[in-house]
Image (cartoon, rainbow, N blue to C red):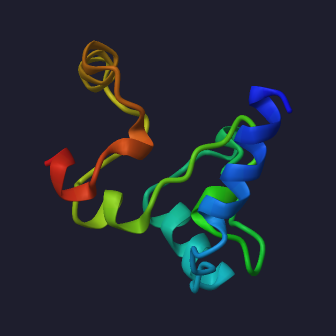
Amino acid sequence: MSTGERHKDSSKEMYAGLPPLKWSKETFNGLVQNFKFPDSWGVRCPDDGQTAADAPAGYITLFWDYFTKGNFRLPVTRFFLDILSYYKFHISQLHPIGMV
């Protein structure tokens, strides 16, 4: 078995216990409108039953709390990207409160 095959197997086990998302398309559309996400960004609401771990290739999961509690806004500033790069963090590794 290759390292890649073992990684695929362990990732399935890791995500098996995550709860599905519980917000509606209307809630998602309200977030998109409220924060004025342009259509060109291609934001999309996860399908019913998907978890945060199910983001398709090329997409990242951003949580509601990033915007409401962490005061996160898109597009991000160059400064914010420099901080992520310097500390070698991915946005998904940050807790909304830690973003403040």
- The relative height of residue 1 versus residue 53 in the rendered view (above or below) is above
Horizontal side of 3 relative to 99 (left or right) equals right
- The relative height of residue 45 versus residue 42 in the rendered view (above or below) is below
- The relative height of residue 8 versus residue 34 in the rendered view (above or below) is above
Horizontal side of 68 relative to 38 (left or right) equals left
Residue sitting at 43 percent across and 57 percent down? 35
Residue sitting at 42 percent across and 33 percent down? 90
Residue in front for this viewpoint, 59 or 34? 59
Horizontal side of 87 relative to 81 (left or right) equals left
Residue sitting at 67 percent across and 51 percent down? 11
Residue in front for this viewpoint, 14 or 100? 14
- Horizontal and vertical percent for residue 19? 57, 80
Tell me the quadrant of the picture where the N terminus can be found. top right
Residue sitting at 74 percent across and 80 percent down? 49
Residue in front for this viewpoint, 39 or 45? 45
- Horizontal and vertical percent for residue 86? 26, 13
- The relative height of residue 4 versus residue 9 in the rendered view (above or below) is above
- Horizontal and vertical percent for residue 3? 74, 28
